[in-house]
Image: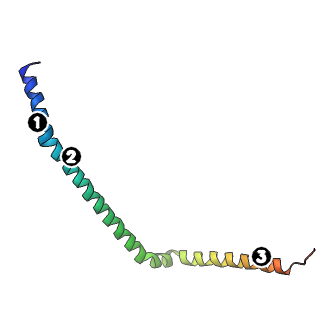
Amino acid sequence: MTSYARDIGEKAKGMKGEVLEPMAKGAAIGSEKLAEGSEAIAEGARRLADKTRHWADDVTGARRRRKLIWLALGLTVLGAVIYLMVRPNES
């Protein structure tokens, strides 16, 4: 190996401690900050969704459909109970 190649190899070894390790630490800190920021954005989105849910339900008609589905389900159960009570006992 030539002396020039040895010099480059030794400099690269020195760079590992001087450059790469601080860069890796910085990247780890940056990813933690990014995760914290993402959590904050998600929490803000959840709060906004909670505050606007009723408005959105009214605009899209989802609340009305949901109430009608529950009403149909309740009437079906009530009808089944009445049918079982009224039918003649054959035993």
Q: Residue furthest top?
A: 1
* Sequence order check, earlier mark of 3 and 2: 2
Q: Quadrant of the C terminus?
A: bottom right
Residue with the mark numbered 1 = 14
Sooner in the amino-acid sequence: mark 3 or mark 1: 1
Which badge, 2 or 1, comes first in the chain's sequence?
Answer: 1
Distance CA(mark 3)–CA(mark 2): 67 Å
Q: What label does residue 24 carry, if any?
A: 2
Instruction: Establish if 11 lies above or below 18.
Output: above
What amino acid is found at the position of numbered circle 3 in the picture? Ala
Count numbered badges in the picture. 3
| Secondary structure category for the residue under label 3 | helix
Secondary-structure class at tag 1: helix
The span from disc 3 to disc 1 (Cα, nearest Å) is 81 Å
Q: Nearer the viewer, residue 39 or 50?
A: 39
Q: Nearer the viewer, mark 3 or mark 1?
A: 1
Q: Amino acid at mark 2?
A: Ala
- Picture coordinates of residue 52 (x, y %)? 42, 76
Q: What label sits on residue 53 in the rendered view? A: none
Write the residue at 11% across / 18% down. 1
Q: Is residue 13 left or right of residue 34?
A: left
Q: Residue visible at 37% across and 69% down? A: 45
Residue type at mark 1 is Gly
Q: Quadrant of residue 74?
A: bottom right
Considering depth in this image, is 42 or 23 the residue closer to the camera? 23
Q: Which residue is mark 3?
A: 80
Badge nearest the viewer, 3 or 2: 2
Q: Dot 3, how many residues are within 10 Å of its Cα: few (below 14), some (14-19), or many (20+)? A: few
Horizontal side of 57 relative to 26 (left or right) equals: right
